[in-house]
Image (cartoon, grey):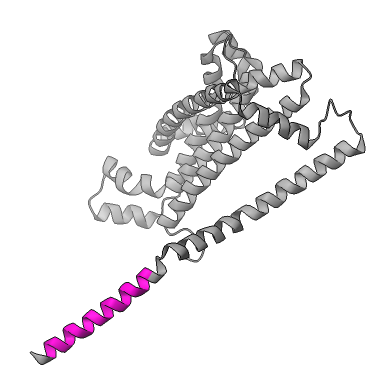
Amino acid sequence: MATDQRTDDATDRAAARITGLDALELAPGGRTGRFAERLWRAAWPKLLAVALAVLIWQLVVWSGWRPEFVLPSPLRVWDELTVQLFDASFWDAIRLTMSRALLGFAIAVVVGSVVGAAVARFAPLRAAIGSLITGLQTMPSIIWFPLAILLFQLSENAILFVVVLGAAPSIANGLITGIDYVPTAWRRAGRVLGLRGIAMYRHVILPASLPSFVSGLKQGWAFAWRSLMAGELLVIVPGALSIGVRLQGARELNDAPLLIAYIIVVLIIGIIVDMLFNTVDSRLRRRWGLEAGQ
């Protein structure tokens, strides 16, 4: 009885020490400090790059290479951007452009995933259109616009047509590559466990191909975004004041500060989306043990 009592006391003391260590490790101050440290480590190179770019820009303006009404200073562009941030039509333009981008990208994800899975699964289909997908991926999206305008006139469908054609091949190729590089040992393990057909894809192949698929999604988004910007500059839909239309309007009015302000907005949106994809990609790599040092 005495031995059991001593054992219970020792267990309680060990549990208390572990709880204390966990509490120390998970203390709000400690987590806040580590988060701030990670945030600063990730942010300072970007802030330094932005500062250098602004400095070079200002030096070019000071050199007098172009008149300031053609190439305004960073401060003038910042003032214009600040004014736009409080203009409701500015946010309407961003909302319209982003809705087009998300809709076109969603359609491209569905099309690219179906085509990629089918090509990876059936060898004759791969032999028939595998190279065609790669060929479509290398084609500049802008060459599709004349055909898109013929097919759909100056409409939203013309823009979506080119966005989907620009993004879907990259997504399909990302999925095909991911499926091709699933380790053979994993497939054998799945077969040993009795997995066949769709079950094999659901539990082994598709989860294992996710990192490459996410890379394909990221590349597909880049093509979709480029195609959309080109489309909004070329296909002016009446009544739809998107970012591209406002860029064209600023050029026609020789409003260089507004033009550069919208270019910066496009760049910022691209950076934010890239950070989101990087976050998802990093989490997937940690989940699958692909990070360095694991």
Q: Residue furthest left?
A: 1
Residue 20 located within the stretch drawn in magenta: yes
> Which residue is more in the foreground, 186 or 167?
167
Residue 111 in the image: x percent, y percent?
44, 28
Q: Indicate yes or no whether the magenta region holds residue 138.
A: no
Specify whether 158 is left or right of 71: left
Front residue of this view, candidates 268 and 105: 268
Prevailing secondary structure of the magenta residues: helix
- Residue 216 is situated, as x and y percent measured from the top left of the image, at 51, 40
Horizontal and vertical percent for residue 229? 62, 25
Total numbered labels placed on residues in the image: 0
Picture layout, residue 154 above or below residue 190: above
Say whether residue 98 is visible: yes
Taking the view exactly as shown, the residue that stands out farthest to the bottom is 2
Would residue 143 be seen by someone viewing this image from the given angle?
no
Q: Which residue is found at the position 41% from the left and 50% from the top?
A: 182
Image quadrant where residue 14 sits: bottom left
What's drawn in magenta, residue-wise? 3-23
